[in-house]
Image: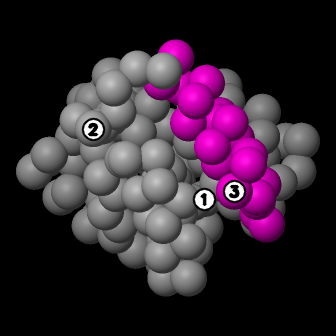
Amino acid sequence: MKNTFNKKVLIVDDEVDICNLLSWILKQKNLAASYVNTLSDAEAALKKDAPSILFLDNYLPDGFGVEFIQFVKENYPATKIIMITAHDSFAEKQKALNKGADFFISKPFTKALINETIDNLLN
């Protein structure tokens, strides 16, 4: 497995429990995770220090994560996007993937699924 110590992860989710859970899982993989709860805070965090991986919820207080994908891909093309949402219809998944998300994970998720997804992105 590649060295992951320099890999930064940004989590964008309005549910603090999800942010804390993902942070804990990622820390066990030696990934430095931080989180924000809105798209505007995500934009500021990206400008400050673009992560290798972005976990992006779709339904946020100030907009839809799926609409934020294009901004990330245009301005931070090296950042991999994992869309993570409880609204996991086929249409939602296709829309996210068509806009450029690298993976789509439904809530609730398992630690094993997060680990497998991270491994697929980093290897």
Q: Earlier in the sequence, mark 1 or mark 2?
A: 2
Question: What amino acid type is highlighted by mark number 1?
Answer: Asn
- Residue drawn at 85 percent across, 42 percent down: 91
The CA span between labels 3 and 2 is 19 Å
Q: Position of residue 87 (x, y in %)?
A: 79, 61
The disc at residue 4 is none
Horizontally, residue 2 falls left or right of residue 17, namely left
Instruction: Categorize mark 2 by other alpha carbons within 10 Å: few (<14), some (14-19), many (20+).
Output: few
Residue 89 visible within the image: yes
Boundaries of the magenta span: 103-123
User: Is residue 17 positioned above or below 60 on the image?
Assistant: below
Quarter of the image where one finds residue 97 = top right
The disc at residue 111 is 3
Q: Earlier in the sequence, mark 3 or mark 1?
A: 1
**Residue that carries the numbered disc 2 in the rendered image:** 5
Q: Secondary structure at mark 1?
A: loop
User: Does 121 lie within the magenta span?
Assistant: yes
Horizontally, residue 30 falls left or right of residue 98, namely left
**Residue that carries the numbered disc 1 in the rendered image:** 58
Q: Are marks 1 and 2 in contact (CB under 8 Å)?
A: no
Residue 96 visible within the image: no
Question: What amino acid type is highlighted by mark number 2?
Answer: Phe
Instruction: Categorize mark 1 by other alpha carbons within 10 Å: few (<14), some (14-19), many (20+).
Output: many
Question: What amino acid type is highlighted by mark number 3?
Answer: Lys
Q: Position of residue 38 (x, y in %)?
A: 38, 71
Q: Secondary structure at mark 2?
A: loop
Horizontally, residue 110 falls left or right of residue 100, namely right
Q: Are marks 3 and 2 in contact (CB under 8 Å)?
A: no
User: Is residue 22 positioned above or below 81 on the image?
Assistant: below
Q: Are marks 3 and 1 in contact (CB under 8 Å)?
A: no
- Residue drawn at 35 percent across, 66 percent down: 35
